[in-house]
Image (cartoon, helix red, strand yellow):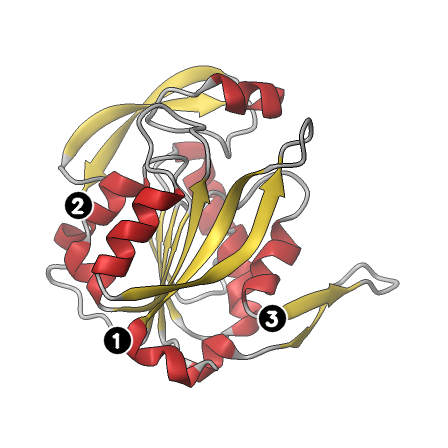
């Protein structure tokens, strides 16, 4: 999904109208669009940081911004901290939900498909390497609780990649999400996890909360039928749309 299997660099850069050109040294050269700059994004919240892939790429587009990163899995958190030492990151080794406490997270064989929720057959058949192999106890907090005593600079970008747990994250962070200028949220069209919000649910909730759906930055189709099964959706605060058009 957002971090998944062979394509994270192009996916993240494409959010912002950039593309990657190969060089002889395999170091990507970033060129192109500027909608994030037009929104004057100053703070980034990365929910579901994995090993810091999104942080490193967003840094190449919006250098020097303050980043708050959330990753509940201990091994991924450790790598994320190591991989983002040169960035202005405050990292939290917790999961986000609508309630605080502790819970078990299912760890997948590829790590990036790990989720609190049970996996549906569609996911297992599409990505056999995503099968759960163990469990880990993690701490949960509400996003709004985390930021009760932290001042967020305006023009906030929130990225969410939480493997079907979007509803709980958003409902535990309504106040924080309301401050966002833009959202990048992975969403599915058919259930990959039991009980997850699908795109229709996400769209309805965010539209009612003052955000406009601006399209999919990237979408992935079924290898069997070619029909899209999940995508990364961009939402922008309705009163800011003119800044990016």
Whole-angstrom CA distance, mark 2 to mark 1, is 19 Å
Nearest to the observer: residue 104 or residue 242: 242
- In the picture of the structure, the residue carrying the numbered disc 2 is 142
**Residue at coordinates 54% horizontally, 79% vertically from top-left?**
34
Q: Position of residue 245 (x, y in %)?
A: 48, 82
Whole-angstrom CA distance, mark 2 to mark 3, is 32 Å
- In the picture of the structure, the residue carrying the numbered disc 3 is 17
Q: Circle 2: is it few (<14), some (14-19), or many (20+) Cα within 10 Å?
A: many
- Residue 29, quarter of picture: bottom right
Q: For the residue labelled by badge 2, is the local secondary structure a helix, a strand or a loop?
A: loop
The residue lying furthest to the right in this view is 24
- Residue 169, quarter of picture: top left
Q: Circle 3: is it few (<14), some (14-19), or many (20+) Cα within 10 Å?
A: some
Which numbered tag is attached to residue 63? Answer: none
Q: For the residue labelled by badge 3, is the local secondary structure a helix, a strand or a loop?
A: loop
Nearest to the observer: residue 184 or residue 44: 184
Is 13 left, or right, of 102 in this rendering?
A: right
Q: Circle 1: is it few (<14), some (14-19), or many (20+) Cα within 10 Å?
A: few
Q: For the residue labelled by badge 1, is the local secondary structure a helix, a strand or a loop?
A: loop
Which numbered tag is attached to residue 153? Answer: 1
């Amino acid at each position: 999904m957002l971090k998944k299997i062979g394509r994270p660099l192009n996916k993240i850069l494409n959010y912002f109208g950039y593309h990657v050109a190969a060089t002889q040294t395999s170091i990507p050269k970033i060129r192109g669009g500027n909608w994030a700059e037009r929104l004057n994004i100053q703070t980034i919240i990365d929910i579901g940081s994995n090993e810091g892939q999104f942080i490193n790429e967003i840094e190449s587009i919006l250098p020097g911004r303050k980043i708050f990163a959330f990753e509940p899995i201990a091994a991924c958190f450790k790598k994320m901290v190591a991989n983002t030492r040169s960035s202005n990151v405050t990292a939290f080794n917790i999961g986000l939900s609508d309630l605080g406490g502790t819970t078990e997270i299912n760890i997948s064989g590829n790590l990036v498909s790990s989720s609190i929720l049970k996996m549906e057959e569609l996911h297992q058949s599409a990505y056999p390497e995503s099968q759960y192999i163990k469990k880990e106890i993690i701490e949960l907090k509400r996003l709004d609780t985390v930021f009760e005593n932290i001042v967020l600079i305006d023009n906030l970008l929130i990225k969410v990649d939480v493997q079907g747990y979007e509803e709980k994250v958003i409902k535990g962070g309504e106040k924080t999400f309301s401050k966002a200028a833009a959202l990048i949220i992975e969403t599915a069209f058919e259930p990959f996890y039991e009980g997850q919000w699908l795109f229709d649910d996400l769209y309805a909730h965010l539209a009612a909360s003052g955000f406009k759906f601006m399209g999919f930055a990237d979408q992935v189709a079924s290898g069997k039928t070619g029909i899209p099964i999940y995508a990364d959706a961009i939402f922008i605060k309705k009163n800011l749309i003119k800044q990016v058009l």
